[in-house]
Image (tube, grey):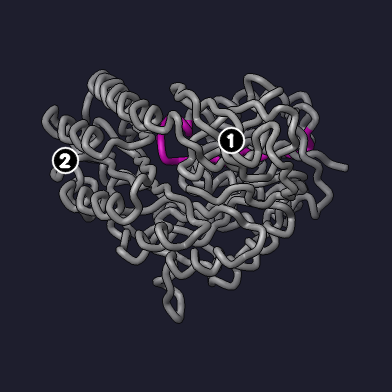
Protein backbone atom coordinates (compact mmCIF):
# COMPACT_ATOMS: atom_id res chain seq x y z
CA UNK A 1 0.00 0.00 0.00
CA UNK A 2 1.52 3.41 -0.99
CA UNK A 3 2.14 5.87 1.82
CA UNK A 4 1.20 9.56 2.14
CA UNK A 5 3.09 12.12 4.24
CA UNK A 6 1.04 15.31 4.70
CA UNK A 7 2.44 18.58 6.09
CA UNK A 8 0.00 21.37 6.95
CA UNK A 9 0.77 25.07 7.42
CA UNK A 10 -1.57 27.91 8.32
CA UNK A 11 -5.17 28.19 9.34
CA UNK A 12 -7.97 25.84 10.38
CA UNK A 13 -9.29 25.88 6.82
CA UNK A 14 -6.01 24.27 5.76
CA UNK A 15 -6.27 21.67 8.52
CA UNK A 16 -9.74 20.84 7.23
CA UNK A 17 -8.51 20.58 3.63
CA UNK A 18 -5.70 18.27 4.75
CA UNK A 19 -8.22 15.96 6.39
CA UNK A 20 -10.21 15.90 3.17
CA UNK A 21 -7.13 15.12 1.09
CA UNK A 22 -6.11 12.32 3.45
CA UNK A 23 -9.60 10.84 3.25
CA UNK A 24 -9.82 11.09 -0.52
CA UNK A 25 -6.40 9.52 -0.99
CA UNK A 26 -7.30 6.75 1.39
CA UNK A 27 -9.90 5.77 -1.20
CA UNK A 28 -6.96 5.48 -3.59
CA UNK A 29 -5.35 3.09 -1.07
CA UNK A 30 -2.87 5.57 0.39
CA UNK A 31 -1.88 5.07 4.02
CA UNK A 32 -0.80 8.02 6.19
CA UNK A 33 2.71 8.04 7.59
CA UNK A 34 4.42 10.48 9.94
CA UNK A 35 7.84 9.70 8.42
CA UNK A 36 8.65 11.51 5.18
CA UNK A 37 11.35 9.01 4.25
CA UNK A 38 8.75 6.21 4.16
CA UNK A 39 6.35 8.08 1.87
CA UNK A 40 5.55 7.54 -1.78
CA UNK A 41 3.70 10.86 -1.90
CA UNK A 42 4.52 14.01 0.10
CA UNK A 43 2.04 16.90 0.07
CA UNK A 44 2.62 20.32 1.64
CA UNK A 45 -0.62 22.19 2.32
CA UNK A 46 0.49 25.82 2.35
CA UNK A 47 -0.44 29.27 3.63
CA UNK A 48 0.20 32.58 1.87
CA UNK A 49 -1.04 35.05 4.51
CA UNK A 50 2.41 35.89 5.90
CA UNK A 51 5.92 35.74 4.49
CA UNK A 52 7.17 33.59 7.36
CA UNK A 53 4.76 30.81 6.39
CA UNK A 54 6.06 30.93 2.81
CA UNK A 55 9.65 30.79 4.03
CA UNK A 56 8.88 27.66 6.05
CA UNK A 57 7.51 25.94 2.95
CA UNK A 58 10.60 26.71 0.86
CA UNK A 59 12.83 25.58 3.72
CA UNK A 60 10.97 22.25 3.92
CA UNK A 61 11.10 21.84 0.14
CA UNK A 62 14.84 22.37 0.33
CA UNK A 63 15.11 19.54 2.83
CA UNK A 64 13.00 17.31 0.59
CA UNK A 65 15.25 17.94 -2.41
CA UNK A 66 17.83 15.50 -0.98
CA UNK A 67 15.16 12.86 -0.42
CA UNK A 68 13.96 13.29 -4.01
CA UNK A 69 17.52 12.78 -5.27
CA UNK A 70 17.81 9.59 -3.24
CA UNK A 71 14.38 8.32 -4.28
CA UNK A 72 13.33 9.91 -7.60
CA UNK A 73 10.09 7.92 -7.64
CA UNK A 74 8.68 9.94 -4.71
CA UNK A 75 6.04 12.46 -5.74
CA UNK A 76 6.22 15.88 -4.06
CA UNK A 77 3.21 18.19 -4.24
CA UNK A 78 2.41 21.69 -3.02
CA UNK A 79 -1.25 22.56 -2.45
CA UNK A 80 -3.27 25.37 -0.88
CA UNK A 81 -3.06 29.16 -0.88
CA UNK A 82 0.64 29.52 -1.62
CA UNK A 83 0.26 27.09 -4.51
CA UNK A 84 -2.57 29.22 -5.90
CA UNK A 85 -0.66 32.48 -5.53
CA UNK A 86 2.96 31.52 -6.18
CA UNK A 87 2.94 28.52 -8.51
CA UNK A 88 5.62 30.00 -10.77
CA UNK A 89 7.98 30.79 -7.92
CA UNK A 90 7.48 27.31 -6.45
CA UNK A 91 8.52 25.57 -9.67
CA UNK A 92 11.42 28.01 -10.13
CA UNK A 93 12.86 27.59 -6.63
CA UNK A 94 11.91 23.93 -6.14
CA UNK A 95 12.14 22.08 -9.46
CA UNK A 96 11.80 18.79 -7.58
CA UNK A 97 8.09 19.52 -7.12
CA UNK A 98 5.85 17.30 -9.27
CA UNK A 99 2.41 18.74 -8.50
CA UNK A 100 1.02 22.19 -7.66
CA UNK A 101 -2.71 22.69 -7.05
CA UNK A 102 -4.99 25.21 -5.37
CA UNK A 103 -7.77 24.71 -2.84
CA UNK A 104 -10.43 24.50 -5.55
CA UNK A 105 -8.81 21.32 -6.87
CA UNK A 106 -8.74 19.41 -3.56
CA UNK A 107 -11.64 17.22 -4.68
CA UNK A 108 -9.60 15.97 -7.64
CA UNK A 109 -6.43 15.17 -5.71
CA UNK A 110 -6.50 11.48 -6.67
CA UNK A 111 -6.73 12.29 -10.37
CA UNK A 112 -4.00 14.93 -10.11
CA UNK A 113 -1.61 12.59 -8.33
CA UNK A 114 -2.05 9.96 -11.05
CA UNK A 115 -1.51 12.56 -13.76
CA UNK A 116 1.68 13.74 -12.08
CA UNK A 117 2.94 10.18 -11.73
CA UNK A 118 2.33 9.49 -15.42
CA UNK A 119 3.42 12.82 -16.87
CA UNK A 120 7.07 12.99 -15.96
CA UNK A 121 6.69 16.78 -15.80
CA UNK A 122 5.14 19.11 -13.22
CA UNK A 123 1.33 19.30 -13.16
CA UNK A 124 -0.19 22.68 -12.23
CA UNK A 125 -3.92 23.09 -11.47
CA UNK A 126 -4.97 26.47 -10.06
CA UNK A 127 -8.19 27.18 -11.97
CA UNK A 128 -11.38 28.16 -10.14
CA UNK A 129 -13.87 25.31 -9.94
CA UNK A 130 -17.52 24.88 -8.89
CA UNK A 131 -18.08 24.66 -5.14
CA UNK A 132 -18.53 21.05 -4.05
CA UNK A 133 -19.17 19.84 -0.50
CA UNK A 134 -16.62 17.14 0.29
CA UNK A 135 -16.94 14.99 3.39
CA UNK A 136 -14.31 12.27 2.95
CA UNK A 137 -12.17 11.98 6.08
CA UNK A 138 -9.48 9.58 7.27
CA UNK A 139 -10.22 7.09 10.02
CA UNK A 140 -9.47 8.72 13.36
CA UNK A 141 -10.82 6.55 16.17
CA UNK A 142 -11.83 8.61 19.18
CA UNK A 143 -11.93 11.93 17.30
CA UNK A 144 -14.06 14.24 19.42
CA UNK A 145 -13.67 17.54 17.56
CA UNK A 146 -13.93 18.36 13.89
CA UNK A 147 -13.88 21.32 11.53
CA UNK A 148 -16.72 21.81 9.06
CA UNK A 149 -16.33 24.30 6.21
CA UNK A 150 -19.63 26.13 5.65
CA UNK A 151 -18.40 28.66 3.09
CA UNK A 152 -15.38 29.43 0.94
CA UNK A 153 -13.74 32.63 -0.20
CA UNK A 154 -14.01 36.29 0.71
CA UNK A 155 -15.07 39.50 -1.02
CA UNK A 156 -13.90 42.07 1.54
CA UNK A 157 -10.64 42.87 -0.33
CA UNK A 158 -8.71 44.07 2.71
CA UNK A 159 -5.59 45.70 1.33
CA UNK A 160 -3.25 43.33 3.20
CA UNK A 161 -4.97 40.06 2.30
CA UNK A 162 -4.56 37.52 -0.51
CA UNK A 163 -7.61 35.37 0.32
CA UNK A 164 -9.83 36.76 -2.47
CA UNK A 165 -7.13 35.61 -4.89
CA UNK A 166 -6.26 32.28 -3.26
CA UNK A 167 -9.77 31.21 -2.19
CA UNK A 168 -12.00 33.16 -4.58
CA UNK A 169 -15.34 34.85 -4.01
CA UNK A 170 -17.73 34.10 -1.13
CA UNK A 171 -19.68 30.90 -1.75
CA UNK A 172 -21.82 29.17 0.89
CA UNK A 173 -22.55 25.47 1.12
CA UNK A 174 -26.30 24.71 1.30
CA UNK A 175 -27.56 24.02 4.84
CA UNK A 176 -28.57 20.46 3.94
CA UNK A 177 -24.98 19.66 2.85
CA UNK A 178 -23.55 21.06 6.08
CA UNK A 179 -26.10 19.22 8.20
CA UNK A 180 -25.37 15.94 6.43
CA UNK A 181 -21.67 16.30 7.23
CA UNK A 182 -22.32 17.16 10.88
CA UNK A 183 -24.68 14.18 11.26
CA UNK A 184 -21.99 11.92 9.81
CA UNK A 185 -19.44 13.32 12.26
CA UNK A 186 -21.82 12.90 15.21
CA UNK A 187 -22.47 9.29 14.23
CA UNK A 188 -18.70 8.74 14.23
CA UNK A 189 -18.40 10.04 17.80
CA UNK A 190 -17.54 13.70 17.24
CA UNK A 191 -18.89 15.87 20.05
CA UNK A 192 -17.75 19.37 19.02
CA UNK A 193 -17.78 21.02 15.61
CA UNK A 194 -16.20 24.29 14.54
CA UNK A 195 -17.83 25.92 11.52
CA UNK A 196 -15.26 27.51 9.23
CA UNK A 197 -15.30 30.32 6.72
CA UNK A 198 -12.99 33.20 5.86
CA UNK A 199 -15.93 35.43 6.80
CA UNK A 200 -18.13 32.85 8.44
CA UNK A 201 -20.78 35.30 9.66
CA UNK A 202 -21.52 36.24 6.04
CA UNK A 203 -22.79 32.69 5.55
CA UNK A 204 -25.91 32.13 3.47
CA UNK A 205 -26.51 35.49 1.88
CA UNK A 206 -25.48 34.14 -1.54
CA UNK A 207 -27.85 31.17 -1.38
CA UNK A 208 -31.35 30.92 -2.83
CA UNK A 209 -33.33 31.28 -0.68
CA UNK A 210 -30.97 33.36 1.42
CA UNK A 211 -30.25 32.29 4.97
CA UNK A 212 -27.73 33.19 7.68
CA UNK A 213 -25.37 31.70 10.23
CA UNK A 214 -27.86 32.08 13.09
CA UNK A 215 -30.34 29.84 11.25
CA UNK A 216 -27.63 27.27 10.52
CA UNK A 217 -26.56 27.19 14.18
CA UNK A 218 -30.16 26.51 15.20
CA UNK A 219 -30.38 23.57 12.80
CA UNK A 220 -27.08 22.04 13.94
CA UNK A 221 -28.16 22.41 17.57
CA UNK A 222 -30.86 19.79 16.89
CA UNK A 223 -28.37 17.09 15.84
CA UNK A 224 -28.11 14.38 18.48
CA UNK A 225 -24.62 13.67 19.74
CA UNK A 226 -23.18 17.12 19.10
CA UNK A 227 -22.49 18.85 22.42
CA UNK A 228 -20.77 22.07 21.36
CA UNK A 229 -20.73 24.36 18.33
CA UNK A 230 -18.08 26.98 17.57
CA UNK A 231 -17.53 29.17 14.52
CA UNK A 232 -14.68 31.23 13.09
CA UNK A 233 -13.65 33.67 11.68
CA UNK A 234 -16.17 36.51 11.95
CA UNK A 235 -15.83 39.95 10.42
CA UNK A 236 -17.16 42.92 12.42
CA UNK A 237 -18.82 44.22 9.25
CA UNK A 238 -21.13 41.17 9.17
CA UNK A 239 -21.80 40.78 12.89
CA UNK A 240 -25.55 41.13 13.47
CA UNK A 241 -27.80 41.36 16.50
CA UNK A 242 -29.48 38.16 15.31
CA UNK A 243 -26.19 36.25 15.42
CA UNK A 244 -25.23 37.70 18.80
CA UNK A 245 -28.57 36.54 20.20
CA UNK A 246 -28.00 33.09 18.70
CA UNK A 247 -24.82 32.80 20.76
CA UNK A 248 -26.97 33.46 23.81
CA UNK A 249 -30.04 31.44 22.88
CA UNK A 250 -28.85 28.36 20.97
CA UNK A 251 -27.85 25.94 23.76
CA UNK A 252 -24.94 24.16 22.08
CA UNK A 253 -23.30 27.33 20.76
CA UNK A 254 -20.48 28.22 23.13
CA UNK A 255 -19.96 31.58 24.78
CA UNK A 256 -16.90 32.45 22.75
CA UNK A 257 -16.38 34.88 19.87
CA UNK A 258 -13.30 35.54 17.76
CA UNK A 259 -13.72 39.02 16.28
CA UNK A 260 -10.65 40.45 14.51
CA UNK A 261 -9.96 44.11 15.25
CA UNK A 262 -6.70 44.42 13.24
CA UNK A 263 -6.17 48.02 14.40
CA UNK A 264 -7.63 50.48 16.88
CA UNK A 265 -6.88 53.42 14.58
CA UNK A 266 -9.58 54.65 12.19
CA UNK A 267 -6.95 55.88 9.77
CA UNK A 268 -5.26 52.48 9.65
CA UNK A 269 -8.59 50.67 9.38
CA UNK A 270 -9.45 52.87 6.41
CA UNK A 271 -6.14 52.09 4.74
CA UNK A 272 -6.81 48.40 5.41
CA UNK A 273 -10.27 48.72 3.79
CA UNK A 274 -11.87 47.03 6.79
CA UNK A 275 -15.25 48.75 6.47
CA UNK A 276 -15.73 49.77 10.13
CA UNK A 277 -14.33 52.23 12.64
CA UNK A 278 -12.90 51.58 16.08
CA UNK A 279 -16.00 53.16 17.60
CA UNK A 280 -18.28 50.81 15.65
CA UNK A 281 -16.17 47.84 16.71
CA UNK A 282 -16.48 48.86 20.38
CA UNK A 283 -20.25 49.26 19.95
CA UNK A 284 -20.42 45.67 18.73
CA UNK A 285 -18.30 44.45 21.65
CA UNK A 286 -20.60 46.28 24.08
CA UNK A 287 -23.65 44.64 22.51
CA UNK A 288 -22.01 41.22 22.68
CA UNK A 289 -21.03 41.68 26.34
CA UNK A 290 -24.51 42.90 27.29
CA UNK A 291 -26.29 40.10 25.41
CA UNK A 292 -23.96 37.28 26.48
CA UNK A 293 -22.56 38.16 29.94
CA UNK A 294 -19.20 36.53 30.60
CA UNK A 295 -18.51 35.70 26.96
CA UNK A 296 -14.88 35.02 26.08
CA UNK A 297 -13.42 37.20 23.35
CA UNK A 298 -10.35 36.86 21.15
CA UNK A 299 -9.03 38.93 18.29
CA UNK A 300 -6.43 39.34 15.53
CA UNK A 301 -4.16 42.38 15.33
CA UNK A 302 -1.69 43.59 12.71
CA UNK A 303 1.07 45.86 13.99
CA UNK A 304 3.28 47.96 11.74
CA UNK A 305 0.81 48.30 8.88
CA UNK A 306 2.06 50.82 6.29
CA UNK A 307 1.62 54.35 7.63
CA UNK A 308 0.92 53.26 11.22
CA UNK A 309 2.22 55.99 13.54
CA UNK A 310 3.02 55.75 17.23
CA UNK A 311 -0.35 57.38 17.93
CA UNK A 312 -2.15 54.84 15.73
CA UNK A 313 -0.48 52.01 17.59
CA UNK A 314 -1.36 53.46 20.99
CA UNK A 315 -5.01 53.50 19.91
CA UNK A 316 -4.75 49.75 19.32
CA UNK A 317 -3.19 49.27 22.74
CA UNK A 318 -6.07 51.26 24.23
CA UNK A 319 -8.71 49.05 22.61
CA UNK A 320 -6.98 45.87 23.83
CA UNK A 321 -6.93 47.24 27.37
CA UNK A 322 -10.59 48.35 27.18
CA UNK A 323 -12.00 45.16 25.67
CA UNK A 324 -9.91 42.87 27.89
CA UNK A 325 -9.63 39.98 25.46
CA UNK A 326 -9.14 36.45 26.69
CA UNK A 327 -6.70 35.86 23.85
CA UNK A 328 -4.94 38.04 21.28
CA UNK A 329 -3.21 36.90 18.09
CA UNK A 330 -0.84 39.69 17.05
CA UNK A 331 1.15 39.67 13.83
CA UNK A 332 3.74 41.99 12.34
CA UNK A 333 2.58 43.27 8.97
CA UNK A 334 4.08 41.25 6.14
CA UNK A 335 4.04 42.35 2.50
CA UNK A 336 2.16 39.90 0.30
CA UNK A 337 2.60 39.97 -3.48
CA UNK A 338 -0.40 41.28 -5.37
CA UNK A 339 -1.94 43.19 -2.46
CA UNK A 340 -2.54 46.94 -2.38
CA UNK A 341 -0.68 47.38 0.92
CA UNK A 342 2.48 45.82 -0.48
CA UNK A 343 2.83 48.81 -2.81
CA UNK A 344 2.16 51.49 -0.18
CA UNK A 345 5.10 53.85 0.17
CA UNK A 346 5.22 54.36 3.95
CA UNK A 347 6.32 50.89 5.07
CA UNK A 348 7.17 50.61 8.77
CA UNK A 349 10.75 49.50 9.63
CA UNK A 350 11.11 45.94 10.93
CA UNK A 351 12.62 47.05 14.23
CA UNK A 352 9.59 49.28 14.90
CA UNK A 353 7.24 46.40 14.11
CA UNK A 354 9.15 44.15 16.50
CA UNK A 355 8.93 46.69 19.34
CA UNK A 356 5.22 47.25 18.82
CA UNK A 357 4.55 43.54 18.60
CA UNK A 358 6.33 42.91 21.89
CA UNK A 359 4.40 45.75 23.56
CA UNK A 360 0.97 44.61 22.39
CA UNK A 361 1.67 41.02 23.44
CA UNK A 362 2.69 42.22 26.90
CA UNK A 363 -0.55 44.15 27.33
CA UNK A 364 -2.58 41.24 25.95
CA UNK A 365 -0.87 38.76 28.29
CA UNK A 366 -1.61 40.96 31.29
CA UNK A 367 -5.32 41.38 30.60
CA UNK A 368 -5.63 37.73 29.55
CA UNK A 369 -4.07 36.61 32.82
CA UNK A 370 -6.53 38.76 34.74
CA UNK A 371 -9.41 37.14 32.85
CA UNK A 372 -8.00 33.69 33.65
CA UNK A 373 -7.61 34.42 37.35
CA UNK A 374 -11.25 35.45 37.48
CA UNK A 375 -12.14 31.81 36.76
CA UNK A 376 -10.37 30.52 39.88
CA UNK A 377 -12.83 29.05 42.35
CA UNK A 378 -15.52 28.54 39.70
CA UNK A 379 -16.90 25.27 38.38
CA UNK A 380 -16.92 24.98 34.61
CA UNK A 381 -18.11 22.19 32.29
CA UNK A 382 -15.12 20.69 30.49
CA UNK A 383 -15.26 18.52 27.38
CA UNK A 384 -12.56 15.93 28.05
CA UNK A 385 -10.60 15.41 24.82
CA UNK A 386 -7.34 13.73 25.77
CA UNK A 387 -4.47 13.37 28.19
CA UNK A 388 -2.32 16.19 29.48
CA UNK A 389 0.86 16.68 27.43
CA UNK A 390 2.97 17.28 30.54
CA UNK A 391 1.44 14.56 32.71
CA UNK A 392 -0.13 11.57 30.90
CA UNK A 393 -1.71 10.57 34.21
CA UNK A 394 -3.98 13.60 33.98
CA UNK A 395 -6.77 14.43 31.56
CA UNK A 396 -7.24 17.62 29.61
CA UNK A 397 -10.17 19.39 28.00
CA UNK A 398 -11.66 22.76 27.23
CA UNK A 399 -14.30 24.91 28.82
CA UNK A 400 -17.06 26.40 26.72
CA UNK A 401 -15.04 29.63 26.72
CA UNK A 402 -12.15 27.72 25.07
CA UNK A 403 -9.79 27.53 28.04
CA UNK A 404 -7.58 24.46 28.36
CA UNK A 405 -7.99 22.73 31.74
CA UNK A 406 -5.77 19.94 33.09
CA UNK A 407 -6.99 17.87 36.02
CA UNK A 408 -6.58 14.55 37.85
CA UNK A 409 -9.38 12.20 36.81
CA UNK A 410 -8.54 9.72 39.62
CA UNK A 411 -8.47 6.85 37.15
CA UNK A 412 -11.95 7.50 35.75
CA UNK A 413 -12.54 6.96 32.02
CA UNK A 414 -14.00 10.34 31.07
CA UNK A 415 -12.82 10.77 27.47
CA UNK A 416 -15.61 12.27 25.36
CA UNK A 417 -17.70 13.36 28.31
CA UNK A 418 -18.47 16.81 29.66
CA UNK A 419 -17.65 16.95 33.36
CA UNK A 420 -17.76 19.69 36.02
CA UNK A 421 -14.29 20.89 36.97
CA UNK A 422 -13.45 23.31 39.76
CA UNK A 423 -10.78 25.72 38.52
CA UNK A 424 -8.11 25.86 41.21
CA UNK A 425 -5.32 27.81 39.53
CA UNK A 426 -4.77 29.96 36.45
CA UNK A 427 -1.47 29.39 34.64
CA UNK A 428 -0.10 31.43 31.70
CA UNK A 429 -1.49 29.12 29.00
CA UNK A 430 -3.91 26.81 30.80
CA UNK A 431 -5.97 26.22 33.92
CA UNK A 432 -5.54 23.69 36.72
CA UNK A 433 -8.61 22.08 38.16
CA UNK A 434 -10.16 19.21 40.05
CA UNK A 435 -13.27 17.18 39.46
CA UNK A 436 -16.41 18.55 41.07
CA UNK A 437 -20.00 17.45 41.46
CA UNK A 438 -21.07 14.31 39.62
CA UNK A 439 -17.57 13.46 38.44
CA UNK A 440 -15.73 13.78 41.76
CA UNK A 441 -14.34 10.74 43.62
CA UNK A 442 -16.93 9.33 46.00
CA UNK A 443 -19.85 10.81 44.07
CA UNK A 444 -22.51 8.67 42.45
CA UNK A 445 -21.04 7.04 39.32
CA UNK A 446 -21.80 8.66 36.00
CA UNK A 447 -22.86 6.47 33.08
CA UNK A 448 -22.12 8.73 30.17
CA UNK A 449 -21.03 7.59 26.73
CA UNK A 450 -20.05 10.95 25.34
CA UNK A 451 -23.03 12.67 26.93
CA UNK A 452 -23.19 15.69 29.20
CA UNK A 453 -22.59 15.07 32.91
CA UNK A 454 -23.27 18.70 33.75
CA UNK A 455 -24.96 21.37 31.72
CA UNK A 456 -24.10 24.54 33.60
CA UNK A 457 -22.25 27.26 31.70
Q: Position of residue 215 (x, y in %)?
A: 46, 70
Q: Residues within 10 Å of mark 1 (few under 14, many from 20)?
A: some
Q: Is residue 122 visible?
A: no
Image height check: is 8 above or below 60?
below
Sequence order check: which comes first, mark 2 or mark 1? Answer: 2
Residue sitting at x 75%, y 50%: 25
| Side of 365 where 178 appears, left or right | right
- Alpha carbon distance from label 2 to label 1: 45 Å
Magenta includes 334?
no
| Side of 135 where 30 appears, left or right | right
- Say which element carries label 1: loop
- Say which element carries label 2: loop
Q: Is residue 105 visible?
A: yes
Residue sitting at x 39%, y 48%: 257
Q: Residue furthest bottom?
A: 209
Dots 2, 1 in contact, CB < 8 A = no
Query: Label 1, on which residue?
Result: 436
Q: Residue furthest left?
A: 311
Q: Which residues are magenta?
A: 39-54
Q: Residues within 10 Å of mark 2 (few under 14, many from 20)?
A: many
Q: Position of residue 445 (x, y in %)?
A: 73, 42
| Side of 321 where 251 appears, left or right | right
Residue sitting at x 13%, y 27%: 310
Q: Position of residue 39 (x, y in %)?
A: 78, 34
Q: Quadrant of the N terminus?
A: top right
Q: 425 or 234, which lies in front?
A: 425
Query: Label 2, on which residue?
Result: 265
Amino acid sequence: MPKLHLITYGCQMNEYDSELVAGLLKRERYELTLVAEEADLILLNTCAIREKAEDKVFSRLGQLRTLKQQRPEILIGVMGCMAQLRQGKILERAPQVDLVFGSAAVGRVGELVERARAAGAPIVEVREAPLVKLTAKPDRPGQLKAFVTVMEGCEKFCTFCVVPVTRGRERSHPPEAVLAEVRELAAAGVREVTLLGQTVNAYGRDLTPATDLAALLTLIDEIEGIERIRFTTSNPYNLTTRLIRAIRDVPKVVEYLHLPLQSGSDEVLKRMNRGYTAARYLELIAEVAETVPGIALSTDLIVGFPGETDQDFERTVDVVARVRYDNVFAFRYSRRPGTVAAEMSDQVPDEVKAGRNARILEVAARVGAERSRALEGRVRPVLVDGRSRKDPGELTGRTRCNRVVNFDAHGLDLLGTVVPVLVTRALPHSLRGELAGAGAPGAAPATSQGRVLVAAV
